[in-house]
């Protein structure tokens, strides 16, 4: 039994354990393991806390994103409404401008017609006076003719103008 190497390994192991127990190494090892367990527990707690903070931040960012999306939609809706309002105003202004220009053009046309009519009447009156003076000067002679001619021309001018 003492010639086998396994026996000597077992005896050396037992002696080593007794020596470790005598020197109190098992307490040091247990203390180190306890410290390591506490450090691991602290790291796990810290990781759990960081995970909760990350989840909280994620929730806040999602809320902000949703709020920003709502704001963007409101801005787009307001911009569309403003564009429609501006287009409506521009259309109304354009229609008003066209109506005013049409009215101005019609007024100018009416004025031109009245002026043309007055010019035609004046030309007709002048032609009638010329014709009457020519006819009367050829058919009537003397002072009676001059008086009739003068009165007739004055009456024609007064009536036609």
Image (cartoon, grey):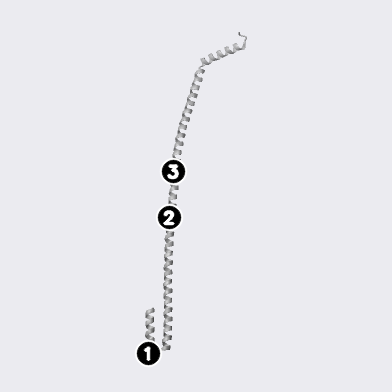
Task: Give SS at disc 2.
Answer: helix
Alpha carbons under labels 1 and 3: distance apart:
103 Å
Alpha carbons under labels 2 and 3: distance apart:
27 Å
Q: Residue at x 38, y 81 (%)?
A: 156
Q: Residue at x 42, y 88 (%)?
A: 139
Residue identified by numbered label 1: 144
User: Tags 2 and 1 in contact by the CB under 8 Å rule?
Assistant: no
Q: Which label lies toward us, 1 or 3? A: 1
* Mark seen at residue 88: 2
Task: Give SS at disc 1.
Answer: helix
**Relative height, residue 95 to residue 44 (above, below):** below
Alpha carbons under labels 2 and 1: distance apart:
77 Å
The tally of labels here is: 3
Residue 13: percent from left, percent from top? 56, 14
Residue identified by numbered label 3: 70
Residue reaching furthest to the right: 3
User: Tags 1 and 3 in contact by the CB under 8 Å rule?
Assistant: no
Residue reaching furthest to the bottom: 142
Indicate which disc, 2 or 1, sits on the residue closer to the N terminus.
2
Task: Give SS at disc 3.
Answer: helix
């Amino acid at each position: 039994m003492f010639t086998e190497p396994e026996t000597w390994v077992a005896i050396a192991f037992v002696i080593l354990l007794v020596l470790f127990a005598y020197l109190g190494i098992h307490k040091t090892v247990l203390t180190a393991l306890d410290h390591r367990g506490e450090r691991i527990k602290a790291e796990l707690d810290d990781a759990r806390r960081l995970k909760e903070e990350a989840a909280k931040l994620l929730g806040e960012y999602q809320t902000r994103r949703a709020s920003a999306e709502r704001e963007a939609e409101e801005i787009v809706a307001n911009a569309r409404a403003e564009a429609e309002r501006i287009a409506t105003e521009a259309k109304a202004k354009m229609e008003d401008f066209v109506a005013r220009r049409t009215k101005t053009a019609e007024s100018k046309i009416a004025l031109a017609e009245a002026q043309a009519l007055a010019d035609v009447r004046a030309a007709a009156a002048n032609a009638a006076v010329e014709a009457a003076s020519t006819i009367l000067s050829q058919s009537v002679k003397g002072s009676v003719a001059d008086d009739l001619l003068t009165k007739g021309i004055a009456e024609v001018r007064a009536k036609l103008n």
